[in-house]
């Protein structure tokens, strides 16, 4: 190796800096793990698509009705009359199958015409859609039969963007996704390094420990930017979820939130030696937040005694701040309480994790 | 004169009730290849990892290259290269990417391509680590130790688990590093490896050095140049003391039905042994002789073999 020593060495470039190399390694490890790509980018989009479609606000002005007519009844032909209305879907049925369809929610209303020609409606008044169907069907029938409205009216629809379930869902899923990729991304990567004894190998080198941790944060920052773009972009393009706040504030909340979640991941990865231990810890941390932090439904549903606890969770703070930004256009000042909670978690997680961190 | 590569004094380390290192002293000179030879569990890894600054010692002193961990940890990390007994490098990275990472930690590193050539991994430069053979992975581990241009290299069991060809490649690599005037501390439980590579050896057992010297000195300490092994169809075991009294024979032991004799003068010992067997009416079923090795030294010191399979 004396021959090596005498050779002039290639001058160093920015690519030879350890922070660059450490960060490149983080990217490579992430990009070469197709499963991680799926969970970080594809899964949340699929979940949004699925839930957004399942809970989309249905047009309330279409009524599905079963029509039962007595043989040889007097006029009018209500089936024909109702079929003219674009707001009514008509199914001619026997009395038995009509009642069966009503019980199974296949129809909202049963219209029974007796031999004299008069019509009675059968429905459960406790069901909203049945009550609405009763009004729509009766209105359509009377109108088609020639009733003249005393007052001329028209409908002018206003879709209340921002108040639909999918609008509520997208910021929540973004928060949940940032939590998952923060805790998993750091916790799993660290335990993997420890399990392979690479952590031990690395600290035997002059590697800067600060730059080692920084490389994780840089790669999280880059990945989270893509996460936000993928999920929010999908919500905006496909479901027209509103973006009422500034994009800059949205990114700030996402980055700050992700920083606290990475802190949780660091905490999970401080000591665990096996992948199983990390999965257990990560789930123990994340599961309560998935339930309590208002991802799928509002956290305000929980009893008042629980509220201080629920509000103190970092995911609650991130979800609330993201929703306030996207749906109400709130400024950063308006979400100060939430940012305060996040800052608390950032300080606590990093202070504890760096103190407990075990390299060997 | 350059400072000693490594000086260890009265080193102790226990894990609970297990005493891993029990008052161990080492002196490794500059430009020396020094071997810690001992069976599994002897305390070799613990010793070497304390020297590498990876395990905290209970007591004792460690000084390397004129520095201690307390006085200049940073300087030591810049100047030593290590290969741990078991490290899995990241499967998803390529050979070149891994070396570039390790290179980035050092102030005066070698170029990646040059170290790749040195460890004969140029063809695998862009292959993912997961595709490498055991020998290639081990050479990459050594490449990671070399990339920072270390003055002192620690190799913990560098050839354990490798096939004969990979072992020879590793030996050539170690020879080259040593020929360039650097110091090496390696551990092994292969006596042929210690004999082949090391200028000096410490034989370690139960956390203590039980013998030290050059391979030739250690073998000479037996007072026997040759070993005779024989088995006989005779029923009763022979009295070992009678065997020891035979001409040219220094020591005798019985091991799983095979007698093993240390002989100073083979030309006297063999006829004496044959006469002895004839006198006892015991025909030979097996007779072998070989030059004494470090294994024989270990057996004579401990009554056990280096590798208890
Ligand atoms: N981290 C540890 N915890 C408990 N016991 C250990 C640990 N490391 C080593 N030992 C014990 O110390 C002794 C020496 O081990 P080691 O230094 O690995 O020996 P060698 O490398 O010579 O095989 C063994 O009995 C081993 O079981
Ligand atoms: Mg060992």
Image (cartoon, rainbow, N blue to C red):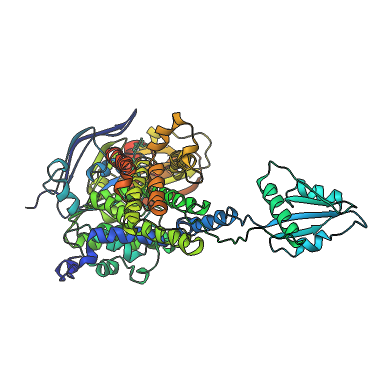
Residue at image point 40% right, 34% down: B240
Whether residue B180 sits left or right of residue B171 in the image: it is left
Q: Is residue B170 something that shows in the picture?
A: yes
Percent of width and height locating residue B169: 34, 63
Please state which of residues A335 and A230 is positioned toward the viewer in this rendering: A335
Whether residue B134 sits left or right of residue A121 in the image: it is left
Whether residue B116 sits left or right of residue A306 in the image: it is left
Percent of width and height locating residue A119: 82, 51
* Rendered-image quadrant of the C terminus of chain B: top left
Residue at image point 36% right, 72% down: B123
**Where's ligand 1: which quadrant?**
top left
**For residue A208, above or below residue A89:** above
**For residue B2, above or below residue B308:** below
Residue B297: quadrant of the picture? top left
Taking the view exactly as shown, the residue that stands out farthest to the front is A150
Q: Is residue B216 something that shows in the picture?
A: no
Please state which of residues A322 and A9 is positioned toward the viewer in this rendering: A322
Residue B113: quadrant of the picture? bottom left
Whether residue B56 sits left or right of residue B137 in the image: it is left
Percent of width and height locating residue B178: 21, 59
């Amino acid at each position: 190796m004396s021959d090596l020593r005498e050779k002039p060495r290639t001058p160093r470039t920015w690519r030879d800096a350890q922070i660059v190399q450490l960060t490149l390694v983080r990217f490579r490890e992430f990009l070469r793990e197709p499963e991680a790509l799926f969970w970080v980018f594809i899964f949340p989009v699929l979940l949004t698509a699925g839930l957004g479609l399942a809970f989309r606000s249905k047009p309330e002005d279409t009524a599905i009705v079963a029509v039962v007519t007595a043989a040889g009844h007097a006029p009018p032909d209500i089936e024909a009359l109702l079929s003219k209305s674009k707001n009514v879907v008509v199914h001619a049925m026997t009395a038995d199958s009509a009642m069966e369809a009503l019980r199974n929610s296949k129809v909202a209303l049963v219209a029974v015409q007796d031999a004299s020609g008069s019509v009675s409606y059968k429905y459960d008044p406790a069901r909203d859609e049945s009550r609405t169907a009763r009004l729509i069907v009766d209105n359509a029938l009377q109108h088609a039969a020639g009733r003249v409205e005393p007052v001329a009216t028209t409908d002018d629809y206003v879709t209340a963007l921002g108040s639909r379930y999918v609008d509520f869902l997208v910021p929540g899923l973004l928060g949940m996704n940032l939590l998952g990729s923060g805790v998993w991304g750091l916790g799993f990567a660290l335990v993997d390094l420890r399990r392979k004894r690479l952590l031990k190998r690395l600290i035997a080198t002059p590697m800067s420990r600060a730059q080692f941790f920084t490389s994780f944060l840089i790669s999280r920052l880059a990945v989270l930017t893509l996460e936000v773009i993928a999920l929010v972009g999908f919500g905006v393009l496909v479901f027209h979820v509103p973006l009422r706040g500034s994009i800059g504030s949205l990114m700030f909340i996402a980055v700050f939130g992700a920083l606290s979640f990475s802190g949780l991941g660091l905490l999970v990865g401080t000591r665990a030696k096996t992948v199983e231990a990390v999965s257990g810890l990560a789930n123990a941390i994340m599961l309560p937040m998935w339930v309590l932090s208002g991802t799928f439904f509002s956290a305000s549903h929980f009893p008042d005694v629980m509220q201080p606890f629920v509000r103190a969770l970092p995911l609650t703070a991130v979800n609330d701040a993201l929703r306030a930004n996207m749906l109400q256009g709130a400024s950063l000042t308006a979400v100060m309480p939430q940012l305060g909670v996040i800052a608390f978690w950032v300080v606590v997680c990093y202070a504890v994790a760096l103190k407990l961190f075990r390299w060997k | 004169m350059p400072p000693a590569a490594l000086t260890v004094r009265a080193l102790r380390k226990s894990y609970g009730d297990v005493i891993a290192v029990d008052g161990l002293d080492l002196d490794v000179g500059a430009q020396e290849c020094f071997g810690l030879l001992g069976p599994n569990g002897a305390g070799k890894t613990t010793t070497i990892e304390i020297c590498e600054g990876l395990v905290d010692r209970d007591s004792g002193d460690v000084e390397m290259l004129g520095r201690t961990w307390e006085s200049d940890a940073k300087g030591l990390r810049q100047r030593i290269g290590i290969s741990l007994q078991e490290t899995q490098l990241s499967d998803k990275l390529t050979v070149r990417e891994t070396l570039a990472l390790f290179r980035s930690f050092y102030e005066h590193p070698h170029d990646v391509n040059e170290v790749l050539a040195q460890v004969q991994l140029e063809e695998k430069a862009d292959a993912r680590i997961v595709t490498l053979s055991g020998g290639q992975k081990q050479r990459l581990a050594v490449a990671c130790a070399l990339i920072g241009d270390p003055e002192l290299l620690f190799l913990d069991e560098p050839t354990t688990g490798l096939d004969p060809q990979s072992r020879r490649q590793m030996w050539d690599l170690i020879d080259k590093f040593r020929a360039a005037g650097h110091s090496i501390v390696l551990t092994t439980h292969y006596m042929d490896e210690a004999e082949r590579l090391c200028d000096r050896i410490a034989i370690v057992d139960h956390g203590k050095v039980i013998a030290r010297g050059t391979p030739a000195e250690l073998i000479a300490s037996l007072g026997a140049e040759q070993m005779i092994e024989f088995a006989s169809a005779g029923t009763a075991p022979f009295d070992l003391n009678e065997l020891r009294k035979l001409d040219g024979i220094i020591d005798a032991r019985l091991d799983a039905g095979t007698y093993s004799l240390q002989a100073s003068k083979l030309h006297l010992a063999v006829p004496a042994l044959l006469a002895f067997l004839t006198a006892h009416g015991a025909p030979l079923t097996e007779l072998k002789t070989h030059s004494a090795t470090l294994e024989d030294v270990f057996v004579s010191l401990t009554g056990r073999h280096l590798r208890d399979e």
